[in-house]
Amino acid sequence: MNHAGIFITLEGVEGAGKSTAVAGVAAWFSQRGFEVECSREPGGTPVAESIRQILLTPAAEALAEPAELMLMFAARAQHVAHRIKPALAAGKVLICDRFTDSSRAYQGAGRGMNRTFIETLAKSAEQGLEPNLTLLLDLPVAEGLARAAARRGLSAHDRFERESADFFERIRAEFLHLATLHPRFAVIKAAEPLAAVQAQIYTVLQARFPLIAAVPMGAQHG
Ligand code: T5A
């Protein structure tokens, strides 16, 4: 790996609790004196956030699948170059709600797009970057969709939330498959109550970063 900082990604289907978990991970590091930045994909820089609008907003002109894939990686290339790499070079902890594994799961397994092409785009956008830890928040698809719907209330579905349950089942299976391939993954049982999910995440952080876990709370990192 490639940098002074720590790069942590969170993955999972819609409503798995990633955004909620980001805050807990951030608190764990900042209480131990680290500077923390939280970001998300698609998005994270002004240009990447503009691309996010195109990707998530339903429009009369349907987005062609290769266009969706390449826009995900266009946003990622901006995010890596202008936000993630500078933060890591400055020794910060960068916590990101989704990263390339989402493209593998959604565009690869969900849409059935060519895996070799996805890896070629990943190599170009990531420029050698790889997460130190990927927290996979795993829960049954129906539960995730129900949580997302409850949170959304009366506002409209985004482009992805309109997809079928089968689409999300393929995505969940792909995330679990990726977790068997890459030791950087830790699988969190996200169907449990919030406090139990948080406890699992802290256990993983302690095991993966024992030297940081040993730092007294409130210490200055430097
Ligand atoms: N996408 C993204 C791709 O197709 N390819 C890519 O390469 C990338 C990067 C992003 C969309 O883009 C797609 C995937 C997505 O469809 P988004 O709006 O950012 O769109 O979508 P999500 O990341 O799925 O965000 P969500 O907000 O839907 O899900 P989260 O962040 O997992 O869930 P969260 O934390 O907002 O929680 C949802 C609700 O559940 C509650 C929360 O309070 C909240 O109300 N909750 C719990 N309730 C009970 N028990 C728990 N343990 C709970 N944890 C959270």
Image (cartoon, grey):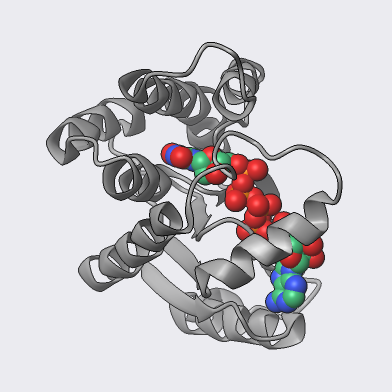
Q: In the rendered view, tell whether residue 110 sits above or below residue 23.
A: above
Residue that appears at 54% across and 23% down: 82
Q: In the rendered view, tell whether residue 38 sits above or below residue 24.
A: above
Q: Nearer the viewer, residue 129 or 92?
A: 129
Residue 9 in sight here: yes
**Position of residue 172 measured from the top left corner of the image (x, y, whole percent):** 40, 64
Q: In the rendered view, tell whether residue 64 sits above or below residue 26.
A: above
Q: Nearer the viewer, residue 17 or 216?
A: 17
Left or right of 161 in this view: 71:
left
Q: In the rendered view, tell whether residue 2 sits above or below residue 143.
A: above
Residue 20 in sight here: no
Q: Nearer the viewer, residue 193 or 127?
A: 193
Q: Nearer the viewer, residue 133 or 6?
A: 133
Left or right of 23 in this view: 107:
left
Specify the quadrant that holds the C terminus. bottom right
**Position of residue 155 measured from the top left corner of the image (x, y, whole percent):** 82, 40
Q: Quadrant of residue 115?
A: top left
Q: Quadrant of residue 205?
A: bottom right
How many marks can you see? 0
**Position of residue 63 measured from the top left corner of the image (x, y, whole percent):** 45, 19
Residue that appears at 57% across and 38% down: 87
Residue that appears at 59% across and 77% down: 190
